[in-house]
Amino acid sequence: MESTIQPLDPIAFSLGPIQVHWYGLIIGCGLALALFLAIREGDKRGLPKDTFADLMLWAIPIAILSARLYYVIFEWDYYTEHPGQIIQIWNGGIAIHGALIGSVLTTYVFAKKRGISFWKIADIAAPSIILGQAIGRWGNFMNQEAHGGEVTRAFLENLQLPEFIINQMYINGAYYHPTFLYESVWNILGFILLILLRRVNLRRGELFLSYVIWYSIGRFFIEGLRTDSLMLGGLRMAQTISIALILGAVIIMIYRRKKNLAKDRYLDKNNQAFTH
């Protein structure tokens, strides 16, 4: 049976000599949906409609560049031998932690210049971000990357997975953990959780910090299954950073409460000035 299994074509279509990859299309769809949801929620929370559209003009390219740079840095031995592949981002090879670093820094500077609270923007964007990540992982699926260790076909069938997922996890003569799917499902659950937490009317900044904690917990455990982790010495970088992010988010949340820096609530429509 395995001899007849063919992977899905990673090329969606071609425009003359230009090949359009599913990887880029899927990530683009995730970004578009995230932007749409953020704009709609921002309007409800009193932000000008052009806030997120203007932010994305800077945040998206910087996030892509920082995600690629992060990946290349930790795979430097490979890219020193294949420098021409550094710019071939369409073949995969971006790191979400790099994207988060770039987008958070960009958002902070943007918020400063606009006179809007960074935390307000981050809170509004948090559910959109994690939903975009859930969609984006399917780009890894199309490229047959970001998978875990070897498993049996019976294991995958016991998970009640569709045939097309099982077959796509058949790579070079073996079946693998669909860790892209585990993370996608975890992120969808995180999206639902954040939508519910929005109704609790948390203090400003706590919805975004809840996103950081939720995503990092899932990423820590899922990363342990992967076979392509970026390493620094004997450490898996994603797990190390996930622990740091969890601790950092908890500490920031406690500090802001103790110092009374988080007085505004998420559902407050007013007070858009930059306040901590």
Image (cartoon, rainbow, N blue to C red):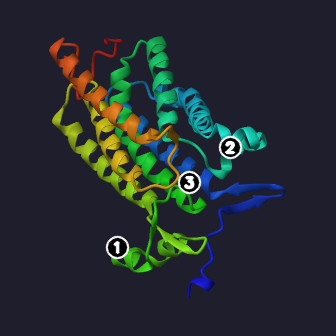
Determine the residue positioned at 55% across, 55% down. Answer: 139
In percent of width and height, residue 33 lies at 47, 46
Q: Amino acid at mark 2?
A: Tyr
User: Of helix, strand and loop, which one carries label 1?
Assistant: loop
The numbered mark, 3 or 1, whose residue comes first in the sequence reads 3
User: Of helix, strand and loop, which one carries label 3?
Assistant: helix
Q: Are marks 2 and 1 in contact (CB under 8 Å)?
A: no
Task: Tell me the CA gap for discs 2 and 1.
Answer: 35 Å
| Disc 3: which residue | 26
Q: Nearer the viewer, residue 10 or 71?
A: 71
User: Of helix, strand and loop, which one carries label 2?
Assistant: helix
| Disc 2: which residue | 78
Q: Is residue 90 above or below residue 67?
A: below
The numbered mark, 3 or 2, whose residue comes first in the sequence reads 3
Task: Tell me the CA gap for discs 3 and 1.
Answer: 24 Å
Determine the residue positioned at 67% across, 56% down. Answer: 21
Residue 85, located in which quarter of the rendered image?
Answer: top right
Label 1: how many Cα within 10 Å (few below 14, some 14–19, many 20+): few
In percent of width and height, residue 56 lies at 53, 31
Q: Is residue 106 above or below residue 75?
A: above
Q: Amino acid at mark 3?
A: Ile
Q: Nearer the viewer, residue 135 or 258?
A: 258
Quarter of the C terminus within the rendering? top left
Residue 84, located in which quarter of the rendered image?
Answer: top right
| Disc 1: which residue | 159
Determine the residue positioned at 62% across, 84% down. Answer: 3
Determine the residue positioned at 33% across, 53% down. Answer: 186
Q: Nearer the viewer, residue 204 or 162?
A: 162
